[in-house]
Amino acid sequence: MNSKTTRLTFFPFLAFFFISFVAMQCPLGQGDERKGHNLVQEKPKQDPFQSLVDKYSKLKELNEKLTLDRQEESEKVLKDKEELKLKESNKLKLGSELKNLEDSLKRKEFKRLESEIAPLKDGIVKRVKRVDDLINGQAINDSNLRICIKDIQSSTKALVGGKRLMIKGVPYTIYIADLNVDMIRLHLKDKDNKNFFSLGTVKSYLQANHIDPLMITNAGMFTPKYEPEGLYVEDSEEKFELDTLANKPNANFYLQPNGVFYVDAQGKAFIKTTKEYRELNKAQKISPIIATQSGPMLLVEGVPHASFKEGSKNLNIRNGVGIIDERKVVFAATQGEVNFYDFAMFFKDIFASQNALFLDGAISQMYVAGVGEQAIGGHFGPMLSVARKKANPQGPVQKEPFKKEEVINRPPKATVPKANESSNSMKK
């Protein structure tokens, strides 16, 4: 073998050796692993519940698109049918006239109508087929959505505490209170009869009393004097009475039915319409420890408020409360804008709530310990908090009176909103 042949044989081997050596020395990317001759990049682990919610969001968005497409195609079919009816009527009229009259212009018009009617009929047939396909596609998607909702609701049975969720591109902060171990309180004024105003002040107040708040949020609409718009019961004392006024134009609170969220003396949570609450209270069938009135009701017996519109463009930040069962309550606040319909369906689809109540809109905030951005601002009237109960051998309900000598370090005063900034302006 001559030297030229030796070099030609040696160089490919040397190149292969060099590439192999470099590949062995280069560190693998984070999350990579060797499987045979392949490099596999591991995806970051995702919260299984969020994965279910992501599937739900995609199915809901697809359902909305299919609904919109079906409506548009159906409207076009109706429009085309009306046009076809008109053209056929004109053609029939011209046809009868042409039998007795040789008019070149009318004959020309007759032929033009004939040429337009045939493709119009074909177009209608295709559009009707398209509508049928959309209806079938929506039926399949609805079936998949129902299965997905069932899976989500099975998972939510075990959920407690705080969580962040992304639903249809909107971030939600939620807190699920278990009333077997959690206590829900309402806050309006301190021992000096001064309004708390901010989430941070309530947080400091609770901590000064050796209570670690797990969740704090605004608890309903309020007047320009920062007093509750309607019923307010704190520590079993009714401080503001039930508001039973009828509808007021452009006022969310008075959009009927509105309602009351309350926890009774047995430690059970309920949301009732204002009418139901008034009747129960009149019959002395309830004894609330806490109660706050707001409106509108998001869900009544599993049905969204009649004025809510699917696909509505009236978007806003929103917070609300829903009943999972008598011992479990879910509080939710969005950090993005949603319409009323989607917000109501969040409680219905994700948590199987039968009754849910809107608390407030644009100004809403929620503090959840260890979750999200730790909001402690705002300038509110009444506020809700959740904290762990202490051991109570006497039963499930625990009253924990605050000390008289607590010292509260108030955070800097938040910017005061306009008098009507509590979102009492109606957006459906």
Image (cartoon, rainbow, N blue to C red):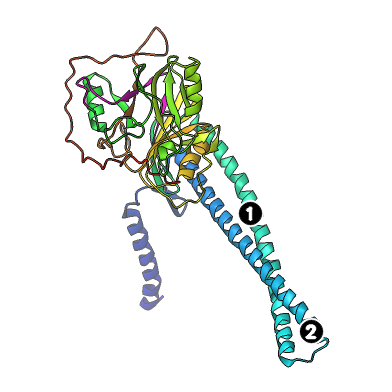
Q: Which residue is mark 2?
A: 97
Mark 2 touches mark 1? (CB < 8 Å): no
Which secondary structure lies at badge 1?
helix
Residue 37: in magenta span? no
Give how far across and how far down residue 358 sits, in percent. 42, 36
Three-letter code, disc 2 = Glu
> Does the magenta segment cover residue 193?
yes
Q: Is residue 33 something one can see in this rendering?
A: no
Q: Say above or below: 167 vs 128.
A: above
First reached walking from the N terminus: tag 2 or tag 1: 2
- Rendered residue at 55%/34% (across/down): 302
Residue 422 or residue 256, whichever sits in front: 256
Q: Residue furthest top?
A: 394
Residue 137, quarter of picture: bottom right
Give residue 135's position: percent from left, percent from top: 65, 54
Magenta segment range?
A: 174-194
Residue identifier under label 1: 137
CA–CA distance in space, label 2 to label 1:
48 Å
Is 147 situated left or right of 365 in this image? Answer: right
Label 1 sits on what residue type?
Answer: Gly
Q: Is residue 61 above or below residue 332?
A: below
